[in-house]
Amino acid sequence: MQRVSRAEVRVDGEVTGRIGRGLLVLVGAADDDTDEDVAWTAEKIVNLRIFADAAGNMNLAVGDVGGGLLLVSQFTLLGDCRKGRRPSFVKAMAPGPAEAMYEKFVAAVRAFGHPVETGRFRAMMEVDLVNDGPVTMLIDSKRLF
């Protein structure tokens, strides 16, 4: 997840999602992710206080600053590079279930009432962003880091 001043995603030159100030969220699904992981992650992202308040402290969540969220599916987040020279994707969820999980995640984030834009699942996408800070956070529903 990256705090951005603006971001957009394009597929074949067509903009599929665009936000101003807010969060660009790259979303990967592991083969053991559940609906509980979706709910926990959506709540964590929407309520994480990583925007500056008047004193310059990270005290505000995306909704507090009127920001949007751009959610982009990215299975390569599950690439395991610890061994060899080619990433292994054995822990990534299969495409069919992963698309359903991604759609559940998009719905869960939208339920908070903030503006939400998306990329296109399984498409080759171009993501353009201006990272604000830069601020980049890793969110893991299994809480391994």
Image (cartoon, rainbow, N blue to C red):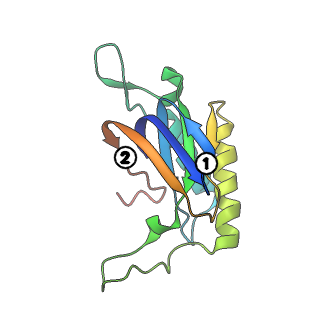
Q: Which residue is mark 2?
A: 137
Q: At x 48% / y 43%, what residue is drawn?
A: 24
Is residue 125 placed above or below 81 in the rendered structure? Answer: above
Q: At x 52% / y 66%, what residue is drawn?
A: 75
- In the rendered image, residue 122, in percent from the top left (x then y), is placed at 63, 66
Is residue 51 placed above or below 106 in the rendered structure? Answer: above
Instruction: Please identify the residue farthest to the front as the structure is shown.
Output: 13
Q: Residue 54: which numbered mark, if any?
A: none
SS label for mark 2:
loop
- The amino acid marked with disc number 1 is Ala
For the residues labelled 2 and 1, the Cα–Cα distance comes to: 18 Å
Left or right side of 138 for 19:
right
Q: At x 45% / y 64%, what residue is drawn?
A: 77
SS label for mark 1:
helix
The answer to whether one can see residue 40 in this image is no
Q: At x 52% / y 28%, what residue is drawn?
A: 67
Q: Residue 39: which numbered mark, if any?
A: 1
- Density class for disc 2 (Cα within 10 Å; few <14, some 14-19, many ≥20) is few
- The amino acid marked with disc number 2 is Met
Is residue 54 placed above or below 97 in the rendered structure? Answer: above
- In the rendered image, residue 89, in percent from the top left (x then y), is placed at 48, 78
The answer to whether one can see residue 90 in this image is yes
Locate residue 49: give its quadrant: top left
Instruction: Please identify the residue farthest to the top as the structure is shown.
Output: 54
Q: Quadrant of the C terminus?
A: bottom left
